[in-house]
Image: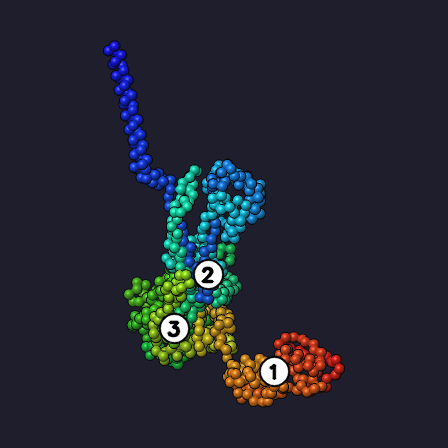
């Protein structure tokens, strides 16, 4: 008995223990589910979900006239959730009913697979119940719009399972045009140009999207948990697409013709400092040209275009004037065991300073600088610093090179540094600095800071405006300025750029030819940098243009006047015709010139026009007569056109409409040749009109 009780007691104790343990487990389960449930559920979610960045739409960069220079366009990745309610519901056959037609539509749109291949692909995803099945990457917006109308997908995400992920790609609609300045020359658009400088404004604020981890290690978005990104702001530049095209084409033409290594052309608005166009072309390995570097802001020895700064110094200090004489030594001057040579051989000795500048004499400039500053070279350097040639321009582009103006404190200063500086060697400048200096001379001495951006825009409204900045109210006295402008015009009329002059307008500028070192080979390869800096039209400067081209070794053509000069001239010609030339009346009255295009008409109509425009006139103007118009003594003069009954009217000088009116009313059949105004008629005015007679009128 005792043994039985002992065994029962132990069994009861085990049952009680197991019951207590079971109750404890149930209690813990209840506690975890209902007390700590939120905590553990959030922890579980955190292990399977994460936030991913949603890129904001990057702002657009516009030209000044509102054309897109750089913009983002949407591309889409298409995925399918094969566990969508409509696709997995056993009571529905959406997938089976639509897979054939969907495959056909996909094959017809993308043409990368056959309908059979698409059907196989879709069935594999459906069989795996893939919740994030990749169908297609990087499709365009128009393709995405079409896909949304396809069978199954048109039912929406919950029934059709279509998931579209949007991403943006940066493009330049004009491709090469100002590519480097805008900033699309590299894979990462934010690396260079305006894309880099204004990245904080263009990029906007990144958003967030909650993504859940699913089978296969992929993630799919959780609806309702997106933090929308804040789109970037737009940038409106000072660039003009038409001007940029002119500049780019003119530079490209010369680069290809001369097989040059690289070149740049800068177009600057005189009164504001706005950069209207900036082209940079470098020769690629295959011989083509591309905007591979912003050469406009890279430093080099400028050569003879720097002589303008030398002239400002000696004229400002009153050491010389335009008519002061200087000995050119037949183009060769030994100094301190070195020899200064003029770029072109000549037999000139004593000439005026103006003539020396026009002929771009290195000897003349070196002698002037050495004669007046060899005991005080830092005073010469001080003039250059006043012209802002010792510092960056501060243009809104990253990577602007640092200029160099030597002083006696410089470690490389020597006995020949000063005379060589006078004609553009031993100094480092960017083409943009050269443009800024010449622009100041064109702008009546006022130096403007060059800039590329007009405003930052948000939702079409400017939130930040950039105005012209004056760096120096006057770089020199009015007396010096007048002499400088006369010398720069003289270069074109009588000097190294005389072959570039045109009878249609005046322009001013300076040629430059600099020998460039080629690494360890020094100057043996005879590589020249050709340049031209100037402004136009000379009597009312609107634009400053600087062209700098580095030629290939031993190039047959390398002088500034024959390489860079023609690029300047082509740009100036086209812009003068398109934008610079103002309407000018040959008779002193633009309204009169415009009206003369009409030539003939009814007297009553002419009276109405002349009275409305308050233009003086003479001659009979009635409701019945027909008159031809001319200009005499700066007023309209009218002569009645012979249109008596039975006589051929004189229609010379009339437009076609007026001539037909008179001739057909006179009973003539009219044959027309050419276009424009009537230049001749086969039957003279005043002749009798024959029956069914034909008259031939020629227009030109």
Residue bearing the label numbered 1: 601
Where is the N terminus found, in terms of image quarters?
Answer: top left
Picture disc at residue 69: 2
Disc 1 vs disc 2: Cβ atoms closer than 8 Å? no
In 3D space, how far apart are the residues under numbered discs 3 and 1 (Cα atoms)? 51 Å
In 3D space, how far apart are the residues under numbered discs 1 and 2 (Cα atoms)? 49 Å
In 3D space, how far apart are the residues under numbered discs 3 and 2 (Cα atoms)? 29 Å
Badge 3 density bin: few <14, some 14–19, many ≥20, Cα 10 Å: many
Q: Position of residue 615 (x, y in %)?
A: 52, 85
Quarter of image, res 100:
top right
Q: Is residue 622 left or right of residue 70?
A: right
Q: Position of residue 292 (x, y in %)?
A: 45, 58
Q: Nearer the viewer, mark 3 or mark 2?
A: 2
Determine the residue positioned at 40% across, 57% down. 232
Q: Is residue 320 left or right of residue 4?
A: right
Residue bearing the label numbered 3: 440
Determine the residue positioned at 26% across, 20% down. 13
Q: Is residue 115 left or right of residue 354?
A: right
Vertical relation: 459 (above or below) 365: above
């Amino acid at each position: 008995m005792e043994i039985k009780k002992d065994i029962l007691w132990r069994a009861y104790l085990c049952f009680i223990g197991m019951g207590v343990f079971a109750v404890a487990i149930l209690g813990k389960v209840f506690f975890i589910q209902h007390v700590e449930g939120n905590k553990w559920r959030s922890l579980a979610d955190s292990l399977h979900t994460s936030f991913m960045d949603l890129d904001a739409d990057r702002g657009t960069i516009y030209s000044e006239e509102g054309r897109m220079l750089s913009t983002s366009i949407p591309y889409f990745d298409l995925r399918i959730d094969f566990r969508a309610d409509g696709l997995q519901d056993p009571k529905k056959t959406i997938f089976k009913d639509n897979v054939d037609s969907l495959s056909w539509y996909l094959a017809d749109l993308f043409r990368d697979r056959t309908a059979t291949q698409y059907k196989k692909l879709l069935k594999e995803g459906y069989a795996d119940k893939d919740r994030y099945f990749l169908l297609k990457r990087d499709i365009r917006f128009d393709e995405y719009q079409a896909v949304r109308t396809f069978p199954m997908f048109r039912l929406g995400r919950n029934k059709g399972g279509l998931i579209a992920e949007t991403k943006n790609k940066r493009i330049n609609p004009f491709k090469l045009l100002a590519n480097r300045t805008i900033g699309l020359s590299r894979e990462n658009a934010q690396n260079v140009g305006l894309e880099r400088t204004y990245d904080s404004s263009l990029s906007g604020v990144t958003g967030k999207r909650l993504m859940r981890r699913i089978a296969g290690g992929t993630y799919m978005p959780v609806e309702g948990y997106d933090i929308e990104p804040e789109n970037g702001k737009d940038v409106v530049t000072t660039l003009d697409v038409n001007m940029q095209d002119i500049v780019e084409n003119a530079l490209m033409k010369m680069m290809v013709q001369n097989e040059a290594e690289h070149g740049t052309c800068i177009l600057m608005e005189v009164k504001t400092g706005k950069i209207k166009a900036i082209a940079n072309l470098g020769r690629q390995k295959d011989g083509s040209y591309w905007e591979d570097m912003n050469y406009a802001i890279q430093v080099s020895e400028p050569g003879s275009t720097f002589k303008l700064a030398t002239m400002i110094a000696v004229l400002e200090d009153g050491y010389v004037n335009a008519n002061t004489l200087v000995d050119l030594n037949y183009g060769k001057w030994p100094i301190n065991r070195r020899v200064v040579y003029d770029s072109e051989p000549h037999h000139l000795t004593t000439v005026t300073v103006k003539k020396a500048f026009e002929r771009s004499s290195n000897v003349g400039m070196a002698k002037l600088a050495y004669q007046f500053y060899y005991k005080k070279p830092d005073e010469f350097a001080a003039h250059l610093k006043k012209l802002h040639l010792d510092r960056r321009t501060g243009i809104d582009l990253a990577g602007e090179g640092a200029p160099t103006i030597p002083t006696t404190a410089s470690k490389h200063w020597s006995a020949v540094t000063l005379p060589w500086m006078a004609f553009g060697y031993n100094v480092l400048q960017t083409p943009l600095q050269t443009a800024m200096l010449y622009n100041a001379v064109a702008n009546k001495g006022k130096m403007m800071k060059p800039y590329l951006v007009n405003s930052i825009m948000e939702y079409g409204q400017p939130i930040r405006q950039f105005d012209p900045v004056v760096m120096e109210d006057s770089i020199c006295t009015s007396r010096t300025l007048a002499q400088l402008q006369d010398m720069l015009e003289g270069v074109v009329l009588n000097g190294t750029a005389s072959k570039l002059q045109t009878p249609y307008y005046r322009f001013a500028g300076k040629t430059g030819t600099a020998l460039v070192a080629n690494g360890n080979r020094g100057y043996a390869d005879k590589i020249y940098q050709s340049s031209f800096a100037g402004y136009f039209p000379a009597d009312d400067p609107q634009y400053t243009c600087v062209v700098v081209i580095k030629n290939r070794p031993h190039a047959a053509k390398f002088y500034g006047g024959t390489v860079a000069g023609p690029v300047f001239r082509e740009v100036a010609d086209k812009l003068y015709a398109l934008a610079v030339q103002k309407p000018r009346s040959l008779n002193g009255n633009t309204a009169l010139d415009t009206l003369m295009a009409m030539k003939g008409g009814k007297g009553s109509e002419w009276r109405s026009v002349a009275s409305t425009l308050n233009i003086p006139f003479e001659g009979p103007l009635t409701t019945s007569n027909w008159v031809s118009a001319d200009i005499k003594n700066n007023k309209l003069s009218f002569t009645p056109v012979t249109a008596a009954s039975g006589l051929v009217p004189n229609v010379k000088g009339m437009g076609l409409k007026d001539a037909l009116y008179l001739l057909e009313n006179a009973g003539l059949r009219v044959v027309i040749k050419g276009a424009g105004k009537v230049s001749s008629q086969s039957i003279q005015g005043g002749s009798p009109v024959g029956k069914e007679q034909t008259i031939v009128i020629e227009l030109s």
